[in-house]
């Protein structure tokens, strides 16, 4: 079973005056060396102001009053989570005590974490602890690394090398985003310099003294326990005896990429898959499970198409892409995805009995409902509807049989009285024998026509157009005048005016 993931999305913050730093290699990590700006008076400006020196901002953790309806509840036990870059799917790993992207290895397994509320931490602010027991810390120079001891609150402590850091800076929003900041101070913007993870203050005064641009990242948490629901279906209709059909007056099917709910982002390889998934949720004939299965398959194929090469770089990115695909598939399959599906289902679909359609008045059998005969809102004046056609009021007498003068009906007298297969008198258009289809019930005829027994065609029962005033009426008038004879006429008998 796949582990939950913290995904990271990136947008570059560019400082036009920042110098281009040299880079150094540290095993599998590439990072940048801080060089002082010519106008700077110090090269060791702190990225995180210490609360002990007084607040420099008004930061409050953007947390909900309750996590009951949220994607992730950080107070709910010790839940395992994972961290990846949403642009590549590559893991953040511990490289020499630094948090960095593992861009030079194919087996870049995800480091797992869990959140812990320290005794002296502010409400809604947590420690982030790795699976090896190391605390994820933000150092005074903005680097993010791993330490053995929690700061147990927001007073900086000093490690064995004299470096100052904080660990109690992490919070979780209702939609699962991981954020960092100093209570009453400033928010810390997570970002990348090279492959290394940094946390820089968003305070304008402090940002002016930060020498290097970072690639800002957005982190979203995916808890392990919710993955146990993968693969379960979500019925469109709670009653299994009802079918989901297009709702009368519903909005048109639509798609909006991968970010409508704030839990996913328009990651380039997946936008087409996300749009198809949106349309699938809007399709009343498709199931929740089927939509999600095809979504997962689409993303996997997109990863293969985006990174087809066998080079190390392509392999790393393809594996990361597949990891993202698994994470996105989990999002749409858990409670968040179910909520979106239910909204689409409510807006687009109605639950009706088999054979019924949704009309303004509710579910209706268009084949037999006199108030919705053939189409929604078509009311039969006679109160009779068969196979989607209204029976005319003028046809209430005894139907005509062969070799008798037919009884005409309809507003212009161009139709005739027939007997339907179930014995009902019905006013319908003439039967044109050579093209008539044999039938045993109304179900054998298209909507708007009926199965009659007294057509006088060679066939015992045929489908007859139940709509009067149609083009075939002119043929009927010629027939009545004896212009045709035999089996090619509308009626086989030898009768005339």
Image: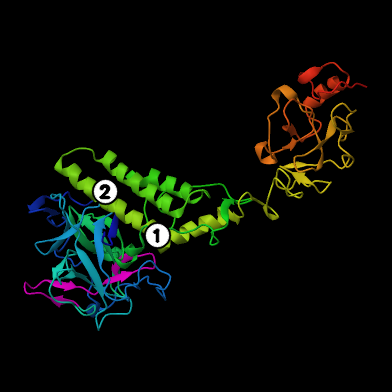
The residue carrying mark 1 is 232
Residue for point 27% across, 49% down? 322
SS at circle 1 = loop
Foreground tag (1 vs 2): 1
Q: Residue at x 68, y 31 (%)?
A: 438
Residue located farthest toward the bottom when viewing the structure as drawn? 119
Q: Where is residue 436 shown, x and y percent of the image?
A: 71, 27
Quarter occupied by the C terminus: top right
10 Å crowding of disc 1: few (<14), some (14-19), many (20+): few
When asked about the image quadrant of residue 391, the answer is top right
**Who is closer to the viewer here, 146 or 305?**
305
Q: Any magenta on residue 22?
A: no
Seen from the viewer's position, the closer of residues 205 and 440 is: 440
Residue of label 2 = 321
| Highlighted range, magenta | 156-180
Distance from label 1 to label 2 (Cα)? 24 Å
């Amino acid at each position: 079973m796949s582990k939950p993931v913290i995904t990271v999305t990136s947008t570059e913050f560019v400082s036009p005056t920042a110098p281009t730093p040299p880079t150094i290699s540290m095993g599998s990590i590439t990072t940048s060396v801080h060089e002082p700006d010519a106008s700077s008076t110090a090269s060791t400006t702190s990225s995180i102001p210490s609360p002990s020196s007084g607040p420099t901002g008004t930061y409050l953790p953007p947390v909900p009053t309750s996590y009951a309806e949220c994607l992730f509840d950080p107070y709910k036990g010790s839940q395992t989570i994972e961290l990846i870059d949403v642009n590549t799917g590559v893991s953040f790993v511990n490289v020499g005590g630094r948090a960095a992207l593992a861009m030079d290895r194919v087996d870049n397994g995800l480091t797992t974490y869990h959140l812990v509320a320290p005794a002296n931490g502010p409400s809604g602010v947590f420690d982030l602890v790795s699976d090896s027991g190391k605390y994820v810390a933000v150092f005074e120079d903005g680097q993010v690394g791993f330490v053995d001891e929690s700061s147990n609150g927001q007073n900086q402590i000093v490690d064995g090398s004299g470096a100052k850091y904080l660990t109690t800076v992490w919070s979780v929003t209702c939609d699962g985003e991981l954020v960092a900041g100093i209570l009453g101070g400033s928010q810390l913007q997570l970002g990348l310099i090279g492959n290394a993870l940094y946390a820089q203050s968003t305070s304008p005064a402090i940002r002016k003294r930060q020498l290097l641009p970072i690639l800002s990242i957005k982190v979203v948490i995916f808890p392990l326990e919710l993955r146990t629901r993968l693969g379960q279906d979500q019925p469109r209709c709670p009653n299994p005896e009802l079918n989901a059909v297009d709702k009368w007056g519903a909005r048109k099917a639509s798609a909006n990429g991968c970010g409508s709910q704030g839990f996913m982002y328009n990651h380039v390889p997946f936008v087409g898959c996300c749009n198809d998934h949106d349309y699938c949720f809007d399709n009343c004939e498709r199931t929740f499970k089927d939509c999600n299965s095809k979504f997962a398959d689409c993303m996997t194929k997109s990863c293969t198409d985006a990174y087809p090469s066998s080079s190390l770089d392509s392999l790393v990115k393809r594996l990361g892409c597949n990891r993202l695909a698994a994470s996105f598939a989990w999002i749409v399959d858990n409670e968040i995805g179910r909520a979106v599906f239910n909204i689409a289902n409510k807006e687009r679909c109605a639950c009706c009995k088999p054979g019924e359609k949704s009309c303004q008045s509710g579910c209706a059998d268009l084949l037999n409902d006199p108030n919705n005969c053939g189409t929604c809102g078509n009311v039969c004046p006679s109160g009779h509807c068969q196979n989607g056609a209204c029976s005319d009021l003028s046809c209430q007498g005894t139907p005509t049989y062969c070799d008798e003068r037919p009884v005409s009906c309809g507003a212009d007298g161009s139709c005739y009285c027939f007997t339907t297969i179930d014995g009902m008198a019905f006013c319908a258009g003439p039967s044109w024998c050579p093209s008539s289809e044999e039938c045993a019930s109304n179900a054998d005829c298209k909507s708007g026509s009926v199965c009659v027994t007294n057509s006088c065609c060679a066939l015992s029962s045929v489908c007859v157009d139940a709509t009067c005033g149609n083009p075939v009426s002119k043929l009927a008038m010629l027939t009545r005048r004896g212009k045709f004879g035999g089996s090619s006429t509308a009626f086989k008998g030898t009768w005339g005016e």
